[in-house]
Every structure is written in structure tokens, then in C-alpha cells.
Image (tube, rainbow, N blue to C red):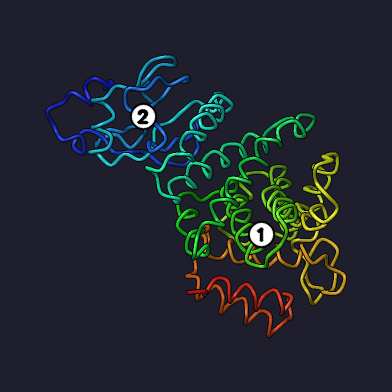
């Protein structure tokens, strides 16, 4: 099977191929079709992931070589087939980030696109940036933060334009789900919530950056452990519970992270009753930014699907968290009340 046979075949493409999983695997990363333009030059190789109806093993086919224009006929047929992702080699990640960054400036200034469409582009740019940042050599982290801070500014600007930022955030975060998406969703929801609390622009940005990077310590945990669907052993749980300290250690040398951000990263799994980790702090000992992040991190986690459980609805998540507060005083009651009002705001 080759690309020309697929796109010029008189058969319905659904009879010839189906799209493979959109998750990153085998050295290729999905790029949503919505960020590509028919007839425009692409500075990296674009691939189509397909599988025959009688062969469950997916194959990667080169669809557009770097420096060539994306074929109009191919693009139209992709849209007709409702194929949402093409793929790029993970080694081209920095080229893709640069491409999305260049596209973003014109996109954000255009009146033709909705605020949700604009935010989705920023979201996807930040998701790819987060993948690059989490995987980068730790000595290069500081030099990579400028792009993230600019994108955080873009998100805050879009959030401030919305009458119902809680609904706006949900419209964006439904597009992806993995470690990078979790970190980005926490960042985005945090930006919207602390803006709701009328924080200053500087504090909003610093909180957002801390939320974006709070789980970077998870990159030191084996992937098979993060995706494990069965109960964790005591040793495995100990590995997981080290990640807040790992995150703080990795980020310690970045002078653009203030003390509040560092504390929120290190303490975001502490519980008000002392049952949290890594230090077992009580509520009065937990940094206020960490108290807020604890709420947002919990809410984002339970409203996203995991290998071992389905996602909760927003109402189910809020009821669960309020129940946990009544039972064990896990969350700060003032911040939890404000968050419930934010999420349920009409």
C-alpha cells in the first residue's frame, strides 16, 4: 500500500484503511490536521498512519516530504475521511514547535477564527513544547522557558475575553489526554481559576508556569509504571510519591521560577489532614499556591480517563472532592468553595 493508491483509489477509503491510534508510539507523534493548510509548504516530513482491514498492524507512510507543499487533493480526502491526525518523526519536534509558533502569530490576530480555535492552537503548541521540555537535557531547560511564558500570556489573554472561562477551558482540554496534556490542562485551568480570583498578571503567569511544570519529576518514573492498570506495590507507590521532590530538584536551578512556584510544585500532593506526600504536612504548613494546585490537580485527574478507570463528570468530581474534604479535610475549605463556584458558574 502506498499513499497514491490510498488517495486516488475509487474505493471508499474506509474499505482500505482505518486511522491508527493517535497516541505517540514508535518514534512518531500526532499532529492535528487542523494545524496544516492545503497547498502550503511543510518544513518537516508528514506521515500517514494506516492499517489494512485484514492486517491489524499499523504502517507509517510518507505523505509529504519536508520542503514540499501539502497536496490539495490529499488534504480534501483526509477531511472527507475524518482523519484528524497526521504524524511527524519525534526527532522533528523542535521544527514542529517552530512551525506552530510562526503560524500562531497570524492566527491569533485573525478575526476569522474563534477564541476556542485560537486557544487550541496555543494548546497544541504548548503540548509539544512540554514534550520537548520534559525530554530535554536538564542543562538546557532555562533557555527554553521564554516560549512557554509567551504562550501562557496568550492563553491568559484569551481566557480574559471569555464570559464563561470555565466552559472555555473544558472546550479546549477535551482534545488530548496524556502526561503532557495533564500538565497543560492543570496550567490552563489554574490560569482561569486564579484569574477568577483576581490575581495580578505577574502572579497568574507564575502560577501557570508552576502548574505546567509541576509533574516534570514524573519523567524519571518508568512509563509502564505510570500506565499500570493493576494496584501498585509498596515500592512502586514509593517511586510515584517521589515525583514532587524530583520535580522540585529538576526545577531548582531555573531562576525564573519564584519561591511560591517552587513550593507549589513540591507540595502539590500534601493533604490538609497530614495524609499526603512527600512530607505529610498539615494544612497550616502547606503553601497557599500548593493548596490551590492540590484542588486543580485532583479535579483535572479525576475528570480525565485513566487506564484503570473512566473519567468522572464535573459534578461527580466536585461531589467526590467535597466528600473527601468532609471526611478528611484534605483541601483548604475556602479555596475549595471558590473552585466549586468557579466550575459551576453560569
For the residue labelled by badge 2, is the local secondary structure a helix, a strand or a loop? Answer: loop
The alpha-carbon separation of the residues under discs 2 and 1 comes to 45 Å
Pick whichever, 149 or 53, lies toward us.
149
Reply above or below: 229 against 6. below
Neighbours of disc 2 within 10 Å: few (<14), some (14-19), many (20+)? some
Q: Secondary structure at mark 1?
A: loop
List the residue tagged with mark 1: 232
- Residue 309 location, x and y as percent? 51, 64
**Direction from residue 224 to residue 45 in the image, left or right:** left
- Counting every numbered tag in the picture gives 2
Residue at (72% x, 74% y) in the render: 331
- Relative vertical location of residue 294 with respect to residue 32 in this rendering, above or below: below
Q: Earlier in the sequence, mark 2 or mark 1?
A: 2
Q: Quadrant of the N terminus?
A: top left
Instruction: Confirm whether residue 227 shows in the render.
Output: no
Question: Which circle marks residue 37 in the picture?
Answer: 2
Amino acid at each position: 500500500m502506498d499513499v497514491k493508491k490510498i488517495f486516488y483509489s475509487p474505493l471508499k477509503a474506509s474499505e482500505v484503511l482505518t486511522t491508527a491510534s493517535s497516541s505517540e508510539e514508535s518514534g512518531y507523534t500526532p499532529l492535528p490536521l487542523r494545524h496544516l493548510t492545503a497547498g502550503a509548504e511543510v518544513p518537516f516530513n508528514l506521515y500517514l498512519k494506516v492499517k489494512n482491514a485484514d492486517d491489524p498492524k499499523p504502517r507509517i507512510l510518507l505523505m509529504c516530504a519536508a520542503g514540499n507543499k501539502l497536496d490539495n487533493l490529499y488534504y480534501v480526502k483526509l477531511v472527507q475521511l475524518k482523519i484528524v491526525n497526521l504524524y511527524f518523526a519525534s526527532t522533528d519536534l523542535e521544527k514542529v514547535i517552530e512551525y506552530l509558533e510562526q503560524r500562531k502569530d497570524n492566527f491569533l490576530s485573525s478575526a476569522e477564527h474563534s477564541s476556542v480555535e485560537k486557544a487550541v492552537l496555543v494548546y497544541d503548541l504548548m503540548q509539544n513544547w512540554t514534550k520537548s521540555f520534559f525530554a530535554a537535557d536538564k542543562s538546557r531547560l532555562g533557555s527554553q522557558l521564554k516560549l512557554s511564558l509567551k504562550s501562557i500570556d496568550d492563553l491568559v489573554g484569551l481566557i480574559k475575553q471569555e464570559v464563561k472561562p470555565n466552559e472555555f477551558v473544558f472546550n479546549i482540554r477535551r482534545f488530548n489526554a496524556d502526561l503532557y496534556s495533564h500538565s497543560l490542562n492543570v496550567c490552563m485551568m489554574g490560569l482561569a481559576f486564579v484569574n477568577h480570583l483576581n490575581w495580578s498578571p505577574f502572579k497568574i503567569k507564575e502560577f501557570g508556569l508552576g502548574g505546567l511544570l509541576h509533574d516534570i519529576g514524573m519523567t524519571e518514573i518508568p512509563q509502564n509504571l505510570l500506565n499500570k492498570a493493576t494496584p501498585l506495590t509498596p515500592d512502586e507507590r514509593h517511586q510515584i510519591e517521589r515525583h514532587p521532590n524530583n520535580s522540585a530538584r529538576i526545577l531548582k536551578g531555573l531562576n525564573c521560577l519564584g519561591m511560591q512556584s517552587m513550593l507549589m510544585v513540591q507540595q502539590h500532593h500534601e493533604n490538609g489532614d497530614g495524609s499526603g506526600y512527600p512530607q505529610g504536612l498539615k494544612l497550616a504548613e502547606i503553601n497557599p499556591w500548593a493548596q490551590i494546585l492540590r484542588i486543580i490537580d485532583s479535579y483535572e485527574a479525576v475528570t480525565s480517563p485513566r487506564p484503570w478507570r473512566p473519567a468522572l463528570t464535573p459534578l461527580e468530581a466536585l461531589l467526590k472532592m467535597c466528600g473527601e474534604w468532609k471526611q478528611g479535610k484534605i483541601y483548604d475549605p475556602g479555596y475549595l468553595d471558590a473552585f466549586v463556584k468557579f466550575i459551576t458558574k453560569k
